[in-house]
Image (tube, rainbow, N blue to C red):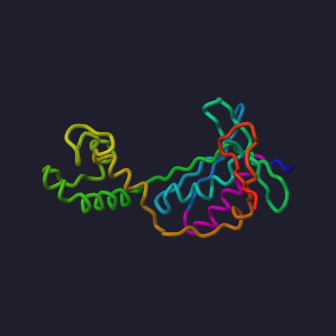
């Protein structure tokens, strides 16, 4: 088995992201600490978090089963050789520019125009969103509701927004074949049916 360090795994993550999202600048930072390691990926605007995670998290080296408080290994193969990735997990977080926040506010104002009008709510500013002032604005229901407050509605619109409909295939990520976990937990277990 080939053991890759967290830094070597981060190089692969960076390469896969560059292949899948040309033109997007990613910050890929590896971190090692007692009993573990992780990679943090950050970027501004562009693809949404789910799209980036679909590429980057191929390189997770472990899983966590909270029911048993157990961290187990994920088994992978590249070019016919068993590989152990050096990062337990790859975390992805997108920053949103003021322009992206404004687009989300405009989208929400269009979709819920009747609600804004019926409740006498003015279209909020980017600054009000950034300061968290919209948590107390009930757009759909009366009273405070964590799902339907204006801050949450705009945040959901932002999280779904993307600059692309499809993600380009990465040769680097495409070489990784997931073989399953260490067999100790049912979390992430590979289910294979006999043909």
Instruction: Specify whether residue 9 is painted magenta.
Output: yes
User: Residue 61 at x, y = what percent?
Assistant: 71, 46
Q: Which residue does the image show at 20% across and 59% down from the upper left?
A: 113
Q: Which residue does the image show at 74% across and 59% down from the upper left?
A: 176
Q: Which residue does the image show at 52% across and 50% down from the upper left?
A: 93
Picture quadrant where residue 172 is located: bottom right
- Quarter of the image with the C terminus is bottom right
Who is closer to the viewer here, 181 or 167? 181
Tally of numbered tags: 0
User: Residue 45 at x, y = what percent?
Assistant: 46, 60
Q: Which residues are magenta?
A: 5-24
Q: Main secondary structure of the magenta part?
A: helix
Who is closer to the viewer here, 60 or 25? 60
User: Residue 177 at x, y = what percent?
Assistant: 74, 58
In the picture, measured across the screen, residue 43 lies left or right of residue 137, that is right
In the picture, measured across the screen, residue 95 lies left or right of residue 144, that is right
């Amino acid at each position: 088995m080939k053991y890759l360090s967290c830094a070597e795994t981060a190089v692969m993550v960076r390469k896969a992201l560059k292949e899948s999202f040309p033109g997007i600048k990613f910050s890929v930072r590896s971190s090692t600490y007692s009993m573990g390691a992780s990679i943090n990926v950050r970027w501004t605007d562009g693809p949404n978090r789910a799209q980036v995670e679909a590429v980057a998290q191929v390189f997770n080296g472990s899983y966590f089963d909270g029911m048993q408080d157990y961290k187990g290994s994920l088994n992978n193969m590249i070019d016919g050789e068993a590989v152990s990735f050096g990062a337990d997990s790859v975390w992805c977080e997108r920053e949103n520019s003021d322009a992206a926040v404004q687009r989300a506010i405009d989208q929400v104002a269009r979709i819920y125009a009747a609600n804004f009008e019926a409740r006498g709510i003015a279209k909020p500013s980017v600054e009000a969103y950034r300061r968290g002032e919209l948590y107390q604005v009930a757009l759909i229901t009366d009273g405070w509701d964590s799902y339907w407050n204006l801050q949450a509605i705009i945040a959901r619109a932002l999280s779904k927004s993307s600059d692309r409909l499809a993600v380009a295939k990465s040769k680097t990520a495409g070489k990784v074949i997931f073989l399953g976990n260490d067999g100790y937990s049912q979390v992430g277990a590979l289910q294979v049916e006999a043909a």
